[in-house]
Amino acid sequence: MRVQTNRLFSKPAGLLHGGDYNPEQWLDRPDILEEDIRLMKQAHVNEATLGVFAWSVEEPSEGVFHFDWLKEIMDRLYENGIYTILATPTGARPVWLDKKYPEAMRVNSAGERNLHGLRHNHCMSAPAFRARVKMIDTQLAQALGNHPGLLMWHISNELGGECYCPLCRARFQQYLRGRFGGDISALNHAWWTTFWSHQFSDFDEIDPPMKNGEGSIGGLNLAWKEFTSWNMTDFLKTEIDTLRAVTPHIPVTTNFMKLYNGLDYRVLHRPLDVVSWDSYPRFGNNEEPLADTFAENAFDHAVMRSFKKDRPFLLMESAPGLVNWHPYNALKRPGIHSLAGLQAVACGADSVLYFQWRKGRGSFEQYHGAVVDHLGTGDTRVFKEVEAMGSQLQALAPVAGSLSHNRVALLFDWPNRWAIADMAGLSREKKQYERTCLLQHRSLLRMGVDCDILSMQDDLTPYKLVVAPMLYLLELGASENLTRYVQQGGNLVAGYLAGYVNEDTLCWLGGFPGDGLSDLFGVISEEIDTLYPGKTNAAIFEGGTRFAIQDFAELLRLKGAQVLAKYEQDYCQNTPAVTVHTVGTGNAYYVAARLEQAGMEHLYRRCLAEAGIPVQSLPHGVEFHCRYTEKERFAFYLNESENPATIADVFGTDMLTGQVLDGTLRLAPLQAAVLRQAR
């Protein structure tokens, strides 16, 4: 298969190394600004992100703009081979703006308007705020948009949150009018408002789900979240359009936050040229092995990579040492920083960037990790590890622009996530949709099989195996997409809770999974049981192999499917627990209960074999990823365990050490290798 590459930038060559730099905090210390340049060069930094929270310095009073200091910093960086990602400063408003335009401040779900403070708390709908944003963005673009060191625009910072003000309420009502074609009866039917006598006679009667108001209508709750994503995306577009009017040649990004629950990133990423995100795992916590923390981070990387599979993503922020907002802010132990940076590149990033370059002396993030500590020197442990990371990235320069090429996909959708969390059923504690998806990804990763994270509406044809955990909500066209995929030879694994509701959270009639999926899987789920903690069952596969079941179990009626495993006990003893149904030239697998992961891995091995996807025998704690160019493959092996690891059948030249491997790779604890191989 032809694999395209897409270098994000022509300069600098290779991968980006750097991060958030806040010189506006040090304008009274030219000696520190000069020392920053020297230390950046020592650490092999080739990028700095400027101006993220600099609005009050760039526009200290309305209409008075100061960009000379910023140009001087960009000039000095560029002269020393360091390029700039320049942020619009709209993530934190200056005091003067809120005093003059109070509508810019959000209203919370109790109807209370915020006072000035914190950040990321603007009203997305406020015309006055949008006007001030357009003004500062235009002035910034005109002043610095043609600077030779400018790589990219960084829109605001970590967008998020909701606003319940009258402006947003009216905008929500208009959004609903458009969604339902102005037909209030269609909305009432979709939201099933005859229950509890909650019918609306006009769109103007509809409030957002306020803290002291309506919260019992699933369709309303979901529509509000979808509206918030739409409204934030619309706000994002206004910034992008403003910048493109002046600098159409400069790409744009904004930084996402892990699996942030407040916005649907599948919507928000669309107007961006490049996806970027901020990674802050809890390395070294006492709740899970280190390899599991890395595996969760790999899942997050895969989500970000999969939004735009035709280009690399950027790791925009990571902690060079520690953060200041975890419940316990532990330092990265020696070796963790290098491994985490290499993992990001392995998963498709063309950068390892940090928050922040130099620790501030005061305010909320004065103790957040930085490359340069309050000590201010380049001889600290953290600085030396960052310097070593810079050297490694230079060695990996040929990887820049290469892409992943995976044949397995996992479906993860925000509306489905929101609907599962909001449903009044099963167990409040044990639904755990996000963790369930993560565990499936982790199981595949343990077998050396990387996967993309897609939407139920994405094109599935490039994939040999698709896993769809807890596919509770079916968006328009989803069932047709899945059916077509299987008919054309795909292998689909889904199961309990699949296809219960439509896009408005109305239950499908005629049996679950609904909207035709019962024909695809060849089963009907009559009931779903929630098992109390400590209560278990088991699935017995062909040959007597037994795997435990917990939390949830469905009672299935066969509709043409073949039984692969049966329940061991209780009222459902000897009834189907795992089935397969051949449709067209593909197979649809249905897992009716929450199997232990060893059971899922047992099933995945069968599916992978049928799909012709090889499984690797990797030592516990070793993670494997690949990136491709037209002519080369870059194979990443990461030992995330505390034990040495030996991997067989590994050939190529390790780009980090220069060692030529003749079949055996030995990795020390927390060591990685990157093999450059001809395709």
Image (cartoon, rainbow, N blue to C red):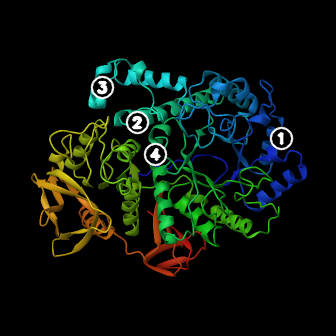
Give the secondary structure at mark 4: helix
- What is the distance, in whole Å, between disc 1 and disc 4 at their CAs? 36 Å
Residue 614 visible in this rendered orientation of the protein: yes
Residue appearing at x 37%, y 17% in the figure: 202
Point out the frontmost of discs 3 and 1.
Answer: 3
Q: Nearer the viewer, mark 2 or mark 4?
A: 2
Residue 422 quadrant: top left
Where is mark 1, residue-wise?
72
* Helix, strand or loop for disc 2: loop
Label of residue 307 in the image: 4
Q: CA distance from mark 2 to mark 1?
A: 52 Å
Name the foreground residue: 389 vs 563: 563
The tag earlier along the polypeptide, 3 or 2, is: 3
- In the image, what residue type sits under mark 2? Gly
Of the residues tagged 2 and 1, which is closer to the observer?
2
| Residue drawn at point x = 55 percent, y = 27 percent | 165
> What mark, if any, has residue 629 been given in the picture?
none
Tag 3–tag 1 contact (CB < 8 Å): no
Tag 1–tag 4 contact (CB < 8 Å)? no
If you read the primary sequence from the N terminus, does the residue marked by circle 3 or circle 1 appear first?
A: 1
Q: Residues within 10 Å of mark 4 (few under 14, many from 20)?
A: many
* Relative image position of residue 546 (x, y in whole percent): 22, 74
Q: Is residue 529 left or right of residue 370?
A: left
Label disc, if present, on residue 215 of the rendered structure: 2
Residue wearing tag 3:
188
Q: Nearer the viewer, residue 548 or 632?
A: 548
Q: Nearer the viewer, residue 328 or 649?
A: 328
Label 1, residues with CA under 10 Å away: few <14, some 14-19, many ≥20:
few
Label 3 to label 4: alpha-carbon separation:
34 Å
Counting the numbered discs, the total is 4
Q: Earlier in the sequence, mark 3 or mark 4?
A: 3
